[in-house]
Amino acid sequence: MTDPGNNYSSCPPCTITNTSGSENTEQPSTSTCGNQIVQIVPTTVHSNCTAEIFVESLKSEKNENDTLEVSEDPAQWRINDKTRNWIAMNGVQQNMDVDFSQSQRIYEDHTRYLSKSLFERQLLDGEKAHRSWLIYSQSTGRVYCGPCLAFGGGTQFGSTGYNDWKNATSRVAQHENSASHKLCILNMKQRGNVLGRIDQRLTAHLNDEIT
């Protein structure tokens, strides 16, 4: 039965003739459909077309990186090069002034919470310096090292987070004096240099440690 809505119902089956005489050629073939001869052009992707697609991809990636916003909660970070670039350019949000109730940890003697004093360290001359690398996560109630988390420090501060408040003072000091921590800060500083930005606070911290 002929479909009245089909304009090609009366057209006999098409026959395709390869005009080049070779099956593997990229030359056009011809198709005979009734009294019409249609040229069939092979779908070859040319190098200039591929280059245009590649350039558009780069532009899209750049735009995404320009509009990227990293969560203030370090536990929500998606660690990749875009996140590292963003942190190197914008620094980290430490969340020092939020509610620390989620940091509750119950010990045998009593319950402890994160203390704001942990964000400061005492120098050899008795002065206090700010720990600009330390970040608090409200979702986990733990603290993280921003540079180590972003650049693969491999410790608790750079992975699952830390919340043993009973031993926090010594453990935080131990972490910031470790070679892996300083290497992550150095990597962050170098990436910031490449991107045209240096985190002055972390750089000053690193210079103090070197001194």
Image: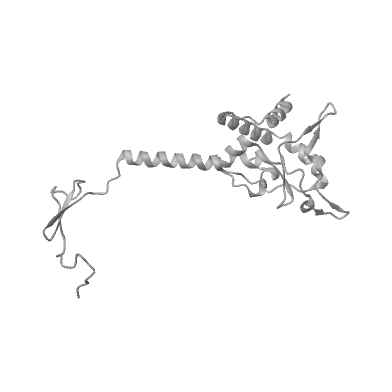
Nearest the viewer among 163 and 202 is 202
- Image height check: is 166 above or below 1? above
210 above or below 70?
above
Considering the image in quadrants, where does the C terminus appear?
top right
Place of residue 193 in the rendered image (x, y in percent of width and height, measured from the top left): 59, 28
Describe the colour scheme in one phrase: one colour
- Residue occupying the point 67% across, 36% down: 180
Which percent across, then down, holds residue 130? Answer: 77, 34
- Image quadrant holding the N terminus, namely bottom left
Q: Residue at x 68, y 36 (%)?
A: 181
Q: Residue furthest bottom?
A: 1
What residue is at 77 percent from the left and 37 percent from the top? 173
- Pick whichever, 66 or 26, lies toward us: 66
* Residue 12 placement, left or right of 178: left
Question: As drawn, is 55 to the left or to the right of 26?
Answer: right
The reply, left or right, for residue 41 in relation to residue 151 is left
Q: How many marks?
A: 0
Q: Position of residue 13 (x, y in %)?
A: 16, 64
Foreground pick, 140 / 53: 53
- Residue at horizontal 30%, vertical 44%? 45
Q: As drawn, which residue projects farthest toward the right?
A: 109
- Name above or below for residue 2 compared with residue 118: below
Residue at far top of view: 211
Of 31 and 19, which appears nearest the observer?
Answer: 31
Q: Position of residue 89 (x, y in %)?
A: 61, 35
